[in-house]
Image: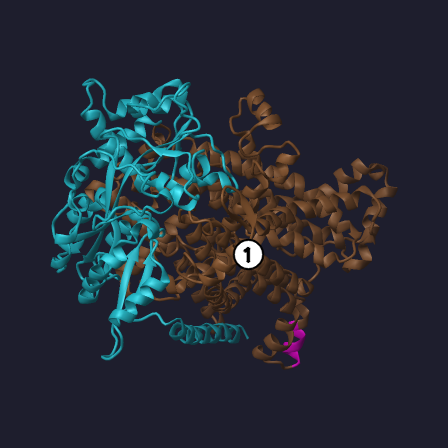
Amino acid sequence: MRMRPSDRGLALLVLLWTLAATLPLYLAWGQLSLVSEASVFDTILNLESRFQTKGALRFTFLEAALSTLLTILLGVPLAWTLGRWRWPARRFLRAFFTAPFVMPSVVVAAGFLALVDSDGPLMVLGIDLRTGTGVVGAFSTASGWSNSGQMIALLLAHAWFNLALIVRFCEPLLSSLDPSLEEAARLLPQGRSRVARLKRLWAPLLWPSVAAAAVLTFIFSFTSFALVKSLTPNSRNIEVVLANQADWAGINIASLGQTPSEIVMALSLIQLVTMVAALALLSALQAKRSRRLPLLSDEAALKPAPLRTWRSVHLALMALFTLSPLLMLALASFQVRDAGGMAFSFAGWQAAFDGTGADSTLSEALTNSVKYAILTMTVALPTGYGLAHTIHRLEATRPRLASLIDILAMLPLALSAVMVGLGVLIGLLRTEPDLLTRWWIPAFGHIMLTTPFVVRILLPAIRRLDPDLESASALLGAGPLRRLISIRLPLLRGSLIVAASFVLAISLGEFGASWVVVRFGEWSTLPVLIGERLSRPGWDPLMRPAAYASSTALLFLTMALFMAVERFRPDGARSEF
Amino acid sequence: MKMKIVGLSLMLMLSSVAFAGCIGSEVGFNENDQPDGEPTTLRILSYDAFGISDEMLDEFTNQTGIEVSLSRAGDAGGVLATALQTQNAPIHDLILGIDNSYLGAALEAGLFQETQNWAVYPRLAERATAPYDGMLVVPFDYGSVCINYDSTYVDGENVTVPESLWDFTGENWTGKVAVQNPRTSSPGRSFLIATTDYFANDADGDTDYADWWAAMYANEVIVTDGWTAAYETHYSGGYGQWYDGFLGDAHAVVSYCHSPGVEAFFGGNWTTSVALDIPGASFAQVEYAGIPVGAVEYIAATTFIEWLLSPNINSQMPTLNYMYSALGSDLPETEGYRHHSVTPTDAEVSPAEINANITDWLDQWDTAMA
């Protein structure tokens, strides 16, 4: 069979993407094997007899599983409450509950620390998730689970981030399913009670969406870094251990030892296998989600808002949960240490804008962030479109290949930043060392991390396009470009705008330090500036408040961007994100 | 039609590259191969916390006409790792912040070339040249790593000031000492080195550092990955008490012998933190500037070292970088900085000894702590 030029182009795109996603891994693996002496399996067997790796495996799987569970427990009721009634400012609420997902975790970690601090609001309620006194301490003692409070704080933070996934995956179905379906169920003997309808109607409809969101939550909790570091200071997950060993991995000098390389090889292998399995599961679940269902437009399916019931209380509580770490962080930026106490002051903001004690000012870093974000968007959107389009075309004829490309498209989200960083470094060093000093190199990392989201957003939208529309216009003589411009792009407009906002928001908040081992002052983005301020000793009373001020600016900027594009989001049961 | 899509994608990609070019020139990162007449750009690599300010770098540029491009790579270990990874094709002209605990590895790898800063050497303090006095690197600051304790806990009655590191294995200190993981933190690494020497030279010939660390592990010592987590989050005697997430469960922490001085300096001459002065239980960390083999701007790098070690600039190290000036001037008297700092008798371990033994020490430590 002869390939059409267009197919060749798409094949080239898939090939390039596959190379970009897997070549760094291959290079890193090669370099690590060169340095390591022990076999991977020996290292895995010895993980528990070394301080560096002890307990990391168990902790990673435990925190990821429990985070997923808590996210479902908090997320499904929220999606139900949000999705089934015609709340005032529904779109605003939906955007608001989704925004945390794109927030930079290094910043949110600081907000959660403020929340659980011994002077924080949770302490007022007698809940100590930091030092573990009172009720939490009693629970720790009774259950024999040391530092249970810190673990709960971590689980809550992971749930805070990933609630958005459940809402995004379930809410559109809940809000647009034809109500006559439930009315019909009510009349049947098997659907008379609420529980029976839940069991026989809603559960079968919702579970693929919940499961898909849960798998993603598991992936993000598994590879979580900044939150684990701050909220559970006595435990390390795999990603933290990998980052710890990253400096010395792959350097072949006797006095630096082989241990770091061996640890990175063993743990990244375990992580890779787990993540690829999770992505394969996700791909299978996504296919289940695309069944055809009788749907109505948003408003038609909804009941009037139950304003004076406990449902509004539920919604208000969840809003408070979403807002509280952000507010706490903003408050902390105005607290400056002054002669044995903390005083309200604008000095932290002043220092952030003046660049005191850092390599760049808030505005310089923000400008750089915006430049990287725009560059990232320009490349990630077409790349993501090309990948989504390829997956869609192959779904009917070669489903296995489609599923493979789907997994490859998602791979960068699941890989350890350490392995990728090492691979990119080695790859660049071997081919073109000067490239390391090019300012746009960090954008490569941003592109790899944001394109999977573009695919996830555009793929369902492309699946929804009516194929008859295109064949009709082709029949009427419209050329390919004409069809793209006057049919495809307008129909995909909403999804494209949403994808763009995701890319911008994630790129703005991307720390990306691991992608480029060395960072140049002139390139400092806002998250890098924040990381730099947080890594310096905090003796200077302005150092932390300036970091919190920069963080607050970043958080509210991201939130605003997200809210602004919500009205472009298309309705429909199969949208993802 | 799909061809057009691909064409369009390619066009977008190409235009983004062109767009990249515009930003690139705006960001103004200087390339090596500049035409003559353009100002020289010195590419410096340092660690995140190195406290040199933009204003000072501007001052340097004004004085010398040399532009500075500063890049950061984590901590001292990250700096060495980056320098080694790029050794065959250096992207920096000057490396700031490799300390004497890493110097042996850097020298073994042949990372540095000799500097021409002859004039600087006679001015250096003895403590700065003690570990290494060759010409491959120039020390620019130093400070000793030792245990700090909270004097509100060590009240002299219920808990007395420890006289030996063994005291920390007693029940007064169960779960109340915070140290850093020596594989991930340079103060942690310095302190591990100090303990190897301390226990090799103590009166007791039967036990060594590995036994002490095993006893510390049994006594629930808190181990963090970095200095900030140990000092800011766990230590009850430091500035961490003012910030969110403070735990305060450790009343002793590994930090610098002048950290209480820094506390006082920023705390209005008030601190409860005291540096523990046990002979041989501290390690003098000396930080170096070095020019890597293959550096493009050798003369500019030499000029920068000269400037960094000029009395005017180097005397600011205690307030800029929280370390002693390599020129030997004392800590400032301001707000009790000097008064609260201790000059200890340090363990004596040479860079060569460290280089020969460190993998073994680290492996022993890993096993003792598991």
In the picture, which quadrant includes the C terminus of chain B?
A: top left
Whether B202 is among the magenta residues is no
- Disc 1: CA contacts within 10 A as few (<14), some (14-19) or many (>=20): some
Asked if one can make out residue B206 in the rendered structure from this viewpoint, the answer is yes
Taking the spot 59% from the left edge, 58% from the top edge, the residue there is: A556
Q: Which residues are magenta?
A: A470-476
Residue A455 point in image, percent of width and height: 55, 60
**Picture quadrant where residue A12 is located:** bottom left
Chain with colour cyan in the figure: B
The answer to whether residue B74 is above or below residue A128 is below
Give the vertical position of B59 relative to B283 (above or below). below
Q: Chain of mark 1?
A: A
Q: Tell me the residue that label 1 is attached to.
A: A346
**In the rendered view of the protein, which quadrant contains the N terminus of chain B?**
bottom right
Q: Colour of chain A?
A: brown
Horizontal side of residue B330 vs B121, given as left or right: right
Q: Where does residue A252 sit, x and y in percent of width and height? A: 22, 46
Query: Which residue shows up at 29% across the image and 23% down it?
Result: B163
Coloration mode: by chain
Residue name at image x 17 percent, y 47 percent:
B125
